Amino acid sequence: MEEYKFLFKIVLVGNAGVGKTCLVRRFTQGLFPPGQGATIGVDFMIKTVEVEGEKIKLQIWDTAGQERFRSITQSYYRSAHALILVYDISCQPTFDCLPDWLREIQEYANSKVLKILVGNKTDREDREIPTQIGEEFAKQHDMYFLETSAKEAENVERLFYEIAAELIGQARSKNGSSAAAAVAAHRQSDGNSSIGLGSFSVKAAQSNCCGGSNSSSNNSSSGDNNTSQAG
Ligand SMILES: Nc1nc2c(ncn2[C@@H]2O[C@H](COP(=O)(O)OP(=O)(O)OP(=O)(O)O)[C@@H](O)[C@H]2O)c(=O)[nH]1
Ligand SMILES: [Mg+2]
């Protein structure tokens, strides 16, 4: 059995088409999939990373943004250690929906879940949401903030490594009780070490909305170490 010190569950949410699957595949497989179809239900991938000499297993749940899958995807929030809420910096409606996503998170996730707001597609020239607006929203809502490009591999590794580092820190502090408990439950060996990453810029805002608008289907959770689930 593979040895690892911590296991963390990370769930990606956000409107259809913002690039959740591309972010996951960039991170887990090092590629930007051409013609990525909409996710059906939920996909699952695993990647083991090493942070300060410790093996950390990341279980990454990539949820469908389409409204019709909402009841399926909600059920994955509860056990998440970290929730990555993604919008597309070139698509205002995906940003406008963030308050709705936060309500979902509040309703279905653990109150201590680590929340990260990610503005994806920074490679695009038709940006509609300035970085500062994203940062402010994140700050207002107690979330970490990062802008990424799955296409250009910008900040993608950093995103997941910093989440891992932050969760390790939480697990080791007395305050990170929920993460610590969950982690302890999954831990296969013990031992500690400390992490000093955590260079997210914390930030965040709020309102109400949508459902996403990808159309196609065809699930594409390829990859050797991933398992698809549809509910
Ligand atoms: N330019 C650019 N396009 C991207 C980037 N990430 C994703 N895309 C494109 O955005 C579209 C949607 O990407 P997906 O990863 O399928 O989006 P998703 O959030 O998983 O969508 P659902 O599964 O429907 O929720 C695809 O055409 C991708 O090629 C990025 O960083 N830059
Ligand atoms: Mg997807």
Image (cartoon, rainbow, N blue to C red):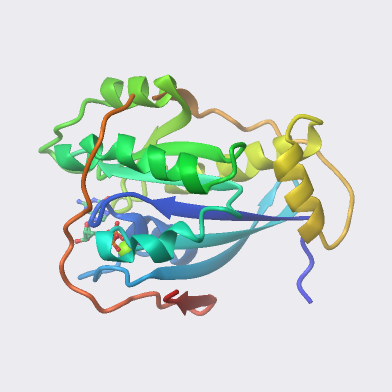
Left or right: 54, with 96 as reference point: right
Query: Extreme left residue here?
Result: 126
Q: Residue 50: x and y, percent?
A: 68, 53
Q: Residue at coordinates 71% horizontally, 36% vertically from top-left?
A: 170
Q: Residue 190: x and y, percent?
A: 89, 53
Q: Residue at coordinates 39% horizontally, 51% vertically from top-left?
A: 13
Q: Residue 91: x and y, percent?
A: 15, 41
Q: Residue at coordinates 42% horizontally, 68% vertically from top-left?
A: 42
Q: How many marks?
A: 0
> In this view of the protein, can residue 66 be seen by the observer?
no
**109 relative to 188, above or below:** above
Q: Residue at coordinates 33% horizontally, 49% vertically from top-left?
A: 14
> In this view of the protein, can residue 167 be seen by the observer?
yes
Camera-nearest residue between 123 and 230: 230
**Quarter where residue 96 is shown:** top left
Q: Residue 122: x and y, percent?
A: 25, 40
Left or right: 173, with 122 as reference point: right
Q: Which image quadrant: the N terminus?
A: bottom right
Camera-nearest residue between 230 and 194: 230
Give the image quadrant in which the ligand numbered 1 is located: bottom left
**20 relative to 122, above or below:** below
Q: Which image quadrant: the C terminus?
A: bottom left
**228 relative to 75, above or below:** below
